[in-house]
Image (spheres, helix red, strand yellow):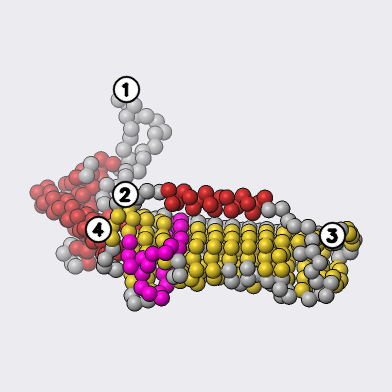
């Protein structure tokens, strides 16, 4: 692995596509720093857009005010300390982000964990659980296949979850809170705040625990106003509903925060002794292309040498090599230790020793009319025979 650095164009965007795990963090430098294997990283830059493609796990540091666009990440992704606009199209694994000013998420295949988001948040499709803490601008749109747990939310919320929902509101700021869950729903609201409730329970069990009074309603629906009713709360649950002014437990959120901080500390502790400064924007991609070209040329040269040797052998011995090779393998029996044929013994199919490069060279010679079909067949047999 190497630590690579490259200048970041002013006011630009970093576009990332990765078939690996990603760790992206903002810092106060006006450069990109990538820790990873240069053989698996490609960088292409123009005046405003820098495109990074990686096939191996990598750690990326970005100027904290920079815009980041993750087009695709096949593994898990971690983000932190970014003040620019962040857009996430698709993450196949889990996704975690902390201390992000502005983020919009289209699709996450696994769980999604978000902490300290400054502006209204969008999470259109989360395959697993959704865990959020300290949402300063609320949750404008979200859908989770599993459970959803939210704490310290300021602003409105629109959330669908296949499982349970638990949400701790700090203040709705008069914006509607609209929740739909396949399971149970628990909502904690600030004491002495004004709400208008529209609650529908599939479990016919609605509980209100407000201002020291506990009320259990064995019915499927409740319409009620508390205080001035300035904040609408609409809940549809497949299971039970509980509305309380008692704060929710923070244990799970603390565990999640500790896990994220542990991951961040681990990433920062990695020491990469070699530093390669990327001056030319195309340096990494050009180096990768040169490596592939050199390996391909060497393989083709080796294949051509073997083919030349095989052709000389054919010229010397005619078609005998083909006849001997075929006769030596067809219906062959495996002798027993005493020299007699072992009854019922199955002969394994011979393994081909012809490389893909040799096959391609022979095919090219056939296409260029340098060989007939029969000659190509004989040549392949000769290559197989000489490889034994």
Query: Which numbered disc, 2 or 1, marks the residue closer to the eye?
Result: 2
**Residue at position x 73%, y 56% from top?**
248
Residue 333 x/y as whole percent: 33, 35
State the residue lying farthest toward the top: 338
Dot 2 or dot 3: first in sequence order is 3
Residue 310 x/y as whole percent: 15, 50
Q: Which residues are magenta?
A: 5-31
Circle 1 is placed at which residue position? Answer: 338
**Residue at position x 54%, y 53% from top?**
260
Q: Which residue is nearer to you in this view: 71 or 176?
A: 176
Distance from disc 2 to disc 3, alpha carbons, whole Å, reads 58 Å
Residue 289 x/y as whole percent: 26, 63
Disc 1 is placed on an element classified as loop
Query: Which numbered disc, 4 or 1, marks the residue closer to the eye?
Result: 4
Dot 3 or dot 4: first in sequence order is 3
Q: Which mark is residue 209?
A: 3
Horizontally, residue 260 falls left or right of residue 44, namely right
Distance from disc 2 to disc 1, alpha carbons, whole Å, reads 63 Å
Q: Which residue is nearer to you in this view: 372 or 122?
A: 122
Dot 4 or dot 1: first in sequence order is 4
Q: Which mark is residue 291?
A: 4
Q: Which mark is residue 273?
A: 2
Query: Which numbered disc, 2 or 4, marks the residue closer to the eye?
Result: 2
Q: Which residue is nearer to you in this view: 122 or 277?
A: 277
């Amino acid at each position: 692995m190497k630590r690579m650095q490259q200048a970041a164009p002013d006011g630009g965007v970093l576009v990332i596509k990765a078939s690996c795990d990603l760790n992206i963090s903002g810092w106060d430098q006006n450069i990109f720093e990538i820790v990873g294997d240069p053989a698996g990283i490609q960088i292409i830059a123009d005046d405003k857009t820098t495109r990074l493609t990686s096939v191996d796990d990598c750690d990326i540091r970005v100027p904290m005010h920079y815009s980041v666009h993750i087009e695709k990440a096949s593994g898990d992704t971690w983000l932190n300390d970014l003040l620019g606009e962040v857009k996430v199209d698709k993450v196949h694994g889990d996704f975690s982000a902390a201390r992000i000013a502005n983020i919009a998420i289209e699709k996450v295949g696994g769980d999604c964990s978000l902490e300290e988001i400054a502006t209204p948040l969008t999470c259109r499709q989360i395959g697993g659980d959704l865990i959020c803490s300290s949402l300063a601008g609320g949750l404008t749109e979200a859908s989770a296949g599993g459970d959803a747990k939210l704490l310290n939310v300021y602003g409105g919320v629109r959330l669908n979850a296949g499982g349970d929902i638990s949400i701790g509101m700090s203040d709705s700021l008069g914006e509607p809170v609209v929740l739909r869950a396949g399971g149970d729903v628990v909502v904690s609201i600030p004491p002495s705040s004004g709400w208008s409730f529209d609650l529908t329970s599939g479990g016919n069990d609605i509980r209100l625990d407000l201002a020291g009074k506990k009320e259990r309603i064995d019915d499927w629906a409740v319409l009620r106003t508390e205080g001035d009713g300035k904040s609408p709360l609409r809940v549809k649950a497949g299971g039970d509903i509980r509305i309380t002014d008692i704060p929710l437990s923070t244990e799970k959120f603390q565990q999640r925060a500790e896990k994220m901080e542990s991951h961040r500390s681990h990433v920062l502790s990695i020491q990469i002794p070699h530093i390669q400064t990327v001056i030319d924007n195309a340096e990494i991609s050009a180096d990768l292309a040169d490596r592939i070209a050199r390996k391909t040329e060497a393989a083709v040269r080796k294949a051509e040498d073997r083919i030349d040797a095989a052709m000389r052998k054919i010229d010397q011995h005619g078609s005998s090599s083909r006849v001997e090779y075929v006769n030596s393998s067809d219906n062959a029996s495996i002798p027993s230790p005493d020299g007699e044929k072992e009854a019922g013994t199955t002969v394994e199919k011979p393994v081909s020793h012809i490389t893909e490069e040799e096959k391609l060279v022979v095919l090219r010679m056939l296409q260029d009319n340098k060989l007939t079909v029969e000659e190509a067949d004989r040549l392949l047999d000769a290559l197989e025979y000489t490889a034994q």
